[in-house]
């Protein structure tokens, strides 16, 4: 029996979905090791403690709450020092972080501070005696590496969406803690947070992603993609690297090996030929729809359903049909 | 400025990989190698900073067997001043072991700035940069899409999911570069000729204990073949029906 640590990521005073996935994964690890506790670290501005019960719902026995006005924005220097102190003293079997922008920045620092094994962007894991064995997609998702982490605590970052958060109600006893270093003394200072658009769903959180490629022919035609996303109601807009390189969409929208890796319930690829670099970022989507005028485009090899046709003609019809289907409930 | 750029040799991804007979590596036959893409951006970033800001030195460092000298020479032909190979039989999967070897080399180098690509094309871990920063006890900004340096201070933009942040920090520091930073230039013929005479030092990599090890590599399961529903806008009703009744996503 051993306890497991989870980093509960928040932004702007709200939990991110990856926080629940991390806690839920830690729950699975604790249960697999004979029923240890899950201790989740939740840091933010004063008031963040109100999110602790939500972490309990997904399996946290203890929520370590670090409230400080200087933590309104995530600060990796402070969070890494704080997490390292807790992990060092807590005797944990493993520590679960998210393979998000924040988690990828944070976890390697913690591993280096502690001098322990770390595996990044993990899609599955199992305890194997004293070791932790994990799987990690490499080579643009075209190869799966199985890795062994020796020693404790083993640190991993979990690929967003690879493992759904499962409810498993626990007490979530709250423990207060101080940041291990004063946020005011941090050497890297966040001068500005720039929101990526008002109340828009992030592509990492959206159950549906409508994504566009060069087949749309212009930045203006992305309106058709946005319209379809709006018709679904729960969709975000993504793009290929070719499109973000051309400046039609911001780099933050890029889905692919060098962009975001997503696994929504439904992925609609519009005018996307299916370069390896793009497929690496979306091949794990549950259902894939592709619309492309070239019937031999590689995207049709990964798509569950394809329409061969001009995306500019198909999209308005599809948008209207989705609207109608949704209005019928 | 004295800038170090840590680079990795990586294969061209636009290929169908096969697993080697050992089950622990990809089959290297027929693969084309280059600078890992973001590492190329990092070299370019260093060169542009030193070109704009007057005299400086750009040192490129790569860990691995002798084949990494190809990528070091490429960086030299782009304009880097000298190169260091931290020699090891292979590149470990343990990022912390690599970071230890890099930190040992960088420690006494007097660098103002240490650059990495955000992640390598092959392992895609994005761990070695921030780990090296931690071991060197330097400020670190990962995955930056802009970087401005003036009077010993840096301002960088980091893309987050659905948001971005602007961070400020003093040099010396470690920065990993993401999309948005300049693409690697093509070496000129003159650059290629000059690179032959530039110093390339070979030292033993001090990796230390490796706690992350590779068990096996395999190809992912193929997705079951899908189907073409039809052609043009006329296929939309059937698609919507399938999304509703079969895939149950609508």
Image: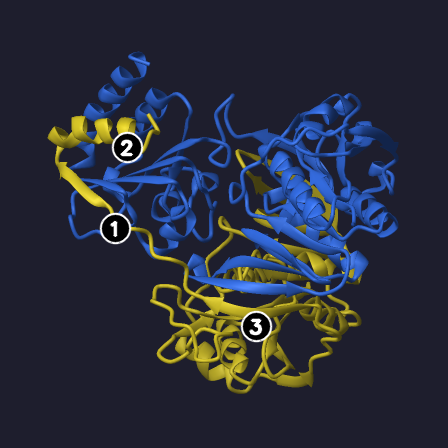
Does residue A261 lie above or below B116 as drawn? above
Of the two numbered discs 1 and 2 in the rendering, the one whose residue sits closer to the viewer: 2
Using the image, tell me which numbered label, if any, was put on residue B225.
Answer: 1
Which sits in the foreground, A160 or B74?
Answer: A160
Where does residue A69 sit, x and y in percent of width and height?
A: 81, 27
Residue B178 left/right relative to A61? left
Residue annotated with mark 3: B80
Which sits in the foreground, B51 or A201?
Answer: A201
- Chain coloured yellow in this rendering: B
Quadrant in the picture for the C terminus of chain B:
top left
Residue at x 56% of width, y 52% of height: A124
Using the image, tell me which numbered label, if any, was put on residue B246.
Answer: 2
- Chain coloured blue in this rendering: A
Which sits in the foreground, A210 or A27?
Answer: A27
- The residue marked by circle 2 belongs to what chain? B
Q: From mark 3 to mark 1, how far is it between C-alphas?
A: 48 Å
Residue A173 left/right relative to A318? right
């Amino acid at each position: 029996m051993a306890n497991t640590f989870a980093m509960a990521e928040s932004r702007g005073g709200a939990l991110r979905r990856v926080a629940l996935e991390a806690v839920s994964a830690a729950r699975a690890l604790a249960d697999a090791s004979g029923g240890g506790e899950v201790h989740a670290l939740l840091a933010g501005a004063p008031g963040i403690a109100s999110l602790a019960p939500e972490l309990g719902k997904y399996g946290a026995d203890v929520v370590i709450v670090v409230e400080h006005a200087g933590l309104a924005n995530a600060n990796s220097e402070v969070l890494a020092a704080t997490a390292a102190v807790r992990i060092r003293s807590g005797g944990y079997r493993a520590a679960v972080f998210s393979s998000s922008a924040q988690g990828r920045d944070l976890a390697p620092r913690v591993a280096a501070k502690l001098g322990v094994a770390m595996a990044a962007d993990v899609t599955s894991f199992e305890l194997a005696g004293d070791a932790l064995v994990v799987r990690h997609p490499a080579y643009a998702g075209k190869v799966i590496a199985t890795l062994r982490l020796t020693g404790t605590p083993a640190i991993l970052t979990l690929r967003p969406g690879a493992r759904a958060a499962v409810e498993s109600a626990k007490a979530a006893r709250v423990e207060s803690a101080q940041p291990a270093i004063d946020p005011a003394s941090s050497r890297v200072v966040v001068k500005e947070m720039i929101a990526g658009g008002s109340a828009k769903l992030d592509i990492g959180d959206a159950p549906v992603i409508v994504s566009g490629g060069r087949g749309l022919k212009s930045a203006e035609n992305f309106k058709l993609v946005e319209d379809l996303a709006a018709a679904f109601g729960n969709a975000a807009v993504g793009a290929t690297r070719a499109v973000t390189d051309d400046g039609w969409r911001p780099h933050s929208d890029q889905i692919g090996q060098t962009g975001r890796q997503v696994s929504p319930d439904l992925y609609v690829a519009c005018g996307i030929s299916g370069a390896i670099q793009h497929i690496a970022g979306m091949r794990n989507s549950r259902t894939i729809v592709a619309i492309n005028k070239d019937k031999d485009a590689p995207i049709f090899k990964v798509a569950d359903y394809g329409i061969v046709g001009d995306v500019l003609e198909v999209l308005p019809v599809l948008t209207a049909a989705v609207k109608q289907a949704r209005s019928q409930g | 400025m004295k800038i170090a750029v840590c680079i990795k040799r990586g294969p061209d991804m636009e290929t169908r990989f096969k697993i080697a007979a050992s089950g622990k590596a990809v089959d290297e036959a027929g693969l084309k190698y280059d600078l890992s893409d973001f590492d190329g951006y990092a070299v370019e970033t260093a060169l542009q900073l030193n070109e704009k800001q007057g005299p400086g030195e750009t040192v490129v460092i790569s860990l691995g067997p002798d084949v990494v000298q190809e990528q070091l020479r490429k960086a030299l032909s782009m304009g880097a001043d000298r190169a260091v190979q931290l020699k090891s039989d292979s590149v470990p999967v343990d990022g912390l072991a690599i970071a230890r070897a890099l930190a040992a080399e960088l420690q006494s180098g007097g660098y103002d700035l240490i650059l990495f690509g955000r992640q390598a094309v092959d392992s895609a871990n994005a761990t070695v940069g921030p780990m090296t920063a931690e071991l060197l006890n330097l400020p670190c900004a990962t995955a930056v899409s802009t970087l401005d340096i003036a009077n010993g201070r840096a301002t960088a933009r980091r893309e987050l999911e659905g948001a971005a942040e602007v961070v400020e920090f003093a040099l010396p520091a470690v920065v990993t570069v993401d999309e948005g930073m300049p693409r690697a230039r093509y070496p000129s013929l003159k650059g290629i000729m000059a690179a032959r005479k530039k110093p390339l030092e070979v030292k033993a990599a001090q990796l230390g204990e490796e706690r992350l090890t590779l068990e096996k590599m395999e190809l992912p399961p193929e997705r079951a073949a899908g189907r073409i529903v039809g052609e043009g806008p006329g296929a939309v009703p059937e698609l919507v029906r399938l999304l509703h009744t079969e895939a149950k996503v609508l």
